[in-house]
Amino acid sequence: MMTPKFQNVVSTAASVAATVMLLRSFTRNYIPPELQHYLYSKLSKFLSFSSELTLVIDQFHGFTLNPLFAAAQLYLKPHEAPNAKRFRATMPSKSRHVSLLMDGNDDITDSFNGVPFRWKLVSRRDKSNSLVHFFEVRFHKKHREMVLSEYLPRVMEEAKAARERRKTLRLFTVKDMRMGGRVELWQGVNLEHPATLATVAMDSDLKEMIIRDLDMFVERKGLYKSVGKAWKRGYLLSGPPGTGKSSLIAAMANYLNFDVYDLELTSVRRNSELRKLLMATRNRSILVVEDIDCSLHLQDRIAKPTSSQPHSHSFHNPPSQVTLSGFLNFIDGLWSSCGDERIMVFTTNHKDKLDPALLRPGRMDVHIDMTYCTPGGFKMLASNYLGITEHPLFVQIDKLLGMINVTPAEVGEQFLLDQDPEIALNSLINLLLEKKRNHELKMKAPLIIE
């Protein structure tokens, strides 16, 4: 049985709760949002006894978007906040990732080095009746210096990392540079190549070396700066057609989350255009020059014309005048330092045809020989295509691979013929035996001397 004193406490609490609910309802229905915000800010300031600071981050600085506001949107995670009851979901154009953002007038509490920060996204109308948005960040005033020197830079860095994680990779190619005018030099599409370093058919030791080299490159910004080198790295992929050079490039892009710029040298008319194209590429990207041995004769053809050069170019398709010296300056000269965290990948079917000046470190730092299919590469393909890691026919195939050259593309084509591992592996064996017979016949054929 309740005592009279306890009954009085309960009655008083009920009266207070009813009064608060009545005031809350009255405030929502009869007080404008602008006045609500003003009263709330004054009350918060009164209750804080001047120990709390409020940092305001506007959405716009003049007519441009405030980078700190955009960073805060990416940094704050409303779906992870236990007190968040409402947030917004968007999917930007040409993106495959859903973005979750704070809703207007909602609160999130963040913590950094043990210090709590209360974030609030405020949405209200200004004097011109335009809807404006800004963040309010509340914290104890004794942390003012730490906020400016550590916390806000951390927000920017975390937002940058989040932006990179959700970025949709793009594949760019050169636009027709004869158009002239101030137009974009590159045109792009989404890069949705499924290749990964886990599925590329190559020896595990070589694959691990590539992964270690890529990891060291992206982690060594400070080292490159301290030794005075441009933050870039060059790779040369050499090997016969079908050995997986293009797939490796796509796998590297997916691993690093780098955009890819596919440069067709024959579409570039002169050295100055080459420099413009380089400057128009973004940081954290891979520049690809495929089949460099046949896409362009890297010599000073203007200074040293020869009678053997073709003259079939029309007025609308003039010959490329990119010189060897211009190309070397493009990949290793002063212009190559215009940008950070860039990788250049060159492919060739005939490494021996390349000018030695191209091959030295600083231009092509890592040489990767993409060989014919090895037993290790074959097992990776069997796992990818057929879902098997062991089979009695593996022994015979390994033996034939030691005698016959077959590309990973040819092996994959056989595995596409049938999903049954037994049928697919026998199909590969028949291909290898046919290649073996053709090789033996070729070796027995009499040498004809004209």
Image: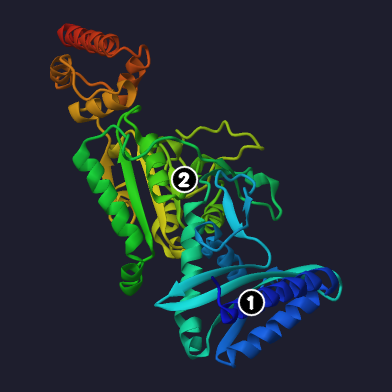
Coordinates of residue 59 in the picture (x, y in percent): 68, 70
Q: Nearer the viewer, mark 1 or mark 2?
A: 1
Local SS, label 1: helix
In the rendered image, the quadrant that contains the N terminus is bottom right
Residue at position x 55%, y 91% from top?
51
Local SS, label 2: loop
Residue 88, placed above or below residue 108? above
Quarter-of-image position of residue 122: bottom right
Q: Tell me if residue 48 can be seen.
A: yes
Label of residue 235 in the image: none
Task: Kindly report the distance in space between the C-alpha atoms of the residues bearing marks 1 and 2.
Answer: 93 Å
> Between disc 1 and disc 2, whose residue precedes?
1
Coordinates of residue 37 in the picture (x, y in percent): 74, 77
Foreground pick, 291 / 376: 376
Foreground pick, 408 / 61: 61
Coordinates of residue 267 in the picture (x, y in percent): 55, 41
Q: What amino acid type should be assigned to the residue bearing mark 2?
A: Arg
Coordinates of residue 389 in the picture (x, y in percent): 22, 25
Q: Tell me if residue 373 can be seen.
A: no
Q: Read off the residue under disc 1.
A: 13
Foreground pick, 391 / 75: 75
Q: Read off the residue under disc 2.
A: 301
In the rendered image, the quadrant that contains the C terminus is top left
User: Relative to 21, is 336 on the left or the right?
Assistant: left
Circle 1: is it few (<14), some (14-19), or many (20+) Cα within 10 Å?
Answer: few
Quarter-of-image position of residue 222: bottom left
Q: What amino acid type should be assigned to the residue bearing mark 1?
A: Ala
